Image: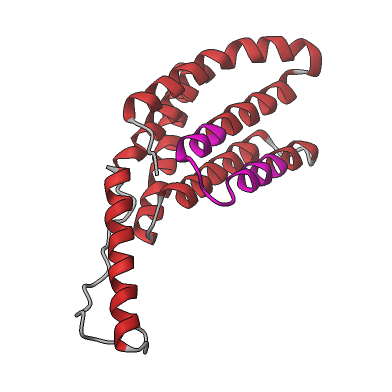
Amino acid sequence: MKRPTLLEGVLVALVLSLLAAPIVVLLHGLVGSLLAWKVVVVVMAYTYMCYLLVQRGRMSGRITLGLLALTVLLAGVALDLRLTSMLLLCVVLIWGIRSFAYSRSLVSAGLQAGVCGLGCGTALMVYEHSGSFALAIWSFFLVQAAFVLIPARLTQRPAVDPGEEVGGSPDGFGRAHHAATQALDRLVTRVAG
């Protein structure tokens, strides 16, 4: 598993925030103000989700997850959800994809939700203070860049005595299963580190 770096996250935040204004200006004349903002929100969120999935590397269900997220976002636009509902939908999808792709425990997934909530709060405060949507986007994605600091697995499985049966399996198979599980955990930890 290849985890993005903090610097990559900061660069993604910068690029997304710089692209927001030109897209809104371009679309504002074509589709109207409100729909332009919704399209910008969907494009920014989906671009970030694709970035997360691409950085994750080979993973079963990656393309399906990306297409499902796109379908949900397009359904939100087609159902004419309010802008605040679209923002909430995007944040929930970002959290879901990051939890699925980068978390291996419920604690880690919960912390991912906390980062998303903190990003929303930060973006809201910045928008209320400055009135700049681009600065709010920058702030949200800048906080999201910090997700790389959350370890994928915060709780380790308890060590099992090699002589003990694992899940009622015969002794030899239980030891082999336990050894294979530990080897995979070490491999994932090395690749993630």
Left or right for 166, reference 65: left
Left or right for 156, reference 116: left
The image shows residue 51 at horizontal and vertical percentages of: 51, 32
Residue 118 position by quadrant: top left
Kindly identify the residue that appears in the image at 53 percent across and 20 percent down: 133
Q: Which residues are magenta?
A: 49-72
Q: Is residue 50 on the magenta stretch?
A: yes
Left or right for 75, reference 107: right
State how the image is colored. Answer: secondary structure
> Quarter of the image containing the N terminus?
top left
The image shows residue 170 at horizontal and vertical percentages of: 34, 89
Kindly identify the residue that appears in the image at 75 percent across and 42 percent down: 75
Residue 165 position by quadrant: bottom left
Query: With respect to residue 123, does 110 lie above or below?
Result: below
The image shows residue 107 at horizontal and vertical percentages of: 34, 58
Task: Kindly report the secondary structure that dominates the magenta region of the rendered protein.
Answer: helix
Residue 51 seen: yes
Question: How many labels were placed on the picture?
Answer: 0
Query: With respect to residue 93, does 108 lie above or below?
Result: below
Query: With respect to residue 87, does 62 lie above or below?
Result: below
Residue 131 seen: no
**Front position in the image: 167 or 16:** 167
Kindly identify the residue that appears in the image at 71 percent across and 10 percent down: 26
The image shows residue 102 at horizontal and vertical percentages of: 42, 47
Left or right for 66, reference 160: right
Q: Is residue 188 on the magenta stretch?
A: no
> Quarter of the image containing the C terminus?
top left
